[in-house]
Amino acid sequence: MGAGVWWAGFSFIPVFGLRGLPRTGLDEPLDRASPTRQGPFAQLAATFGDLKRFPNTLKFLVAYLFFNDGIQTVIGNSSLYGIEELEFPQETVLGIFLFVQFVAFFGARFFGQVAARIGAWKTVLGSLGIWTLIVTVAFFVPAKSLVLFLALAFFIGMVLGGSQALSRSLYSQLIPAGKEAEYFSLYQAMERGTSWFGTLIFGLVYQATLSYRAAILALIVFFLLGGVLLSRVKMREGIIQAGNEVPRVI
């Protein structure tokens, strides 16, 4: 109920906050042959076709689908892991979740400062190494060890906001100018379309081993594959191909 009230409350911001904005371009007739006129599936197919011209953008998108699926699976199944495997009461796990959200704010700011110095690409690669370490340590955490579970929660919070926000920032630099809406729509569609894969692997490993520890450890493959693919993205070349300005630090 609380989540519903939260989303309902914030939905009023765009409704009332955007009402006074000018309708520039919205009343112009659309070309009947354009993908937008033909429908969302035609638009999606057109974006996929256009994506072939930007190989580094495609590589980044595939890399993101892997490591983001790992992140989402860790988040989605950490409560199950804490309750069933580490034997914590539901109230304790809920409190730790709130703790993660609090830490994530400072984590996002910290990773932003790191990215400003060494570049977002290297920072995201480093964050994937931290995610791999988090999953590995989680495998060894003894049951009812609250201190270690809190430590894991702290590092998850630190890396969570930064890795996702910087990933979007990197992707935005690889999008051709003027096509931000359709490329981010593809970004969201692909993210939602593959979000079940990590949970499937988690469930299959649990069914095969009857161990949540083995299931959580199996998620390492998502971070490793995502990291390898991301390391092969030539950011400078991709940014230039997309027609965008190359930042001072990538």
Image (cartoon, rainbow, N blue to C red):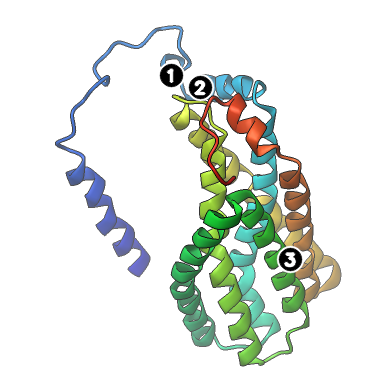
Q: What label sits on residue 127 in the rendered view? A: none
- Residue reaching furthest to the right: 208
Residue, x 62% and y 57% (percent of image)? 123
Quadrant occupied by the C terminus: top right
User: Mark 2 vs mark 1: which is more N-terminal?
Assistant: 1
Is 58 left, or right, of 15 in this rendering?
Answer: right
Inter-mark Cα distance, 3 to 2: 36 Å
Most extreme residue toward the front is: 248
Q: Any mark on residue 43, and which? A: 2
Left or right, 190 with respect to 31, comes to: right
What residue is pinned by disc 3? 132
Name the front one of labels 3 and 2. 3
Q: Measuring from the top left, give residue 50's x and y in whole percent.
A: 60, 20
State which tag comes first along the sequence, 3 or 2.
2
Q: Label 1 amino acid?
A: Thr
Which is in the foreground here, disc 1 or disc 3?
3
As shown in the figure, which amino acid type bears the numbered disc 2? Answer: Gln
Quick one: label 1, few (<14), some, or many (20+) residues within 10 Å?
Answer: some
Which type of secondary structure does the marked residue at label 2 adopt? helix
SS type, badge 3: helix
Query: Disc 1 versus disc 3: distance between alpha carbons?
Result: 41 Å
Query: As displayed, is residue 210 above or below residue 50?
Result: below
Earlier sequence position, callout 1 versus callout 3 = 1
Q: Which amino acid does label 3 sit on?
A: Thr
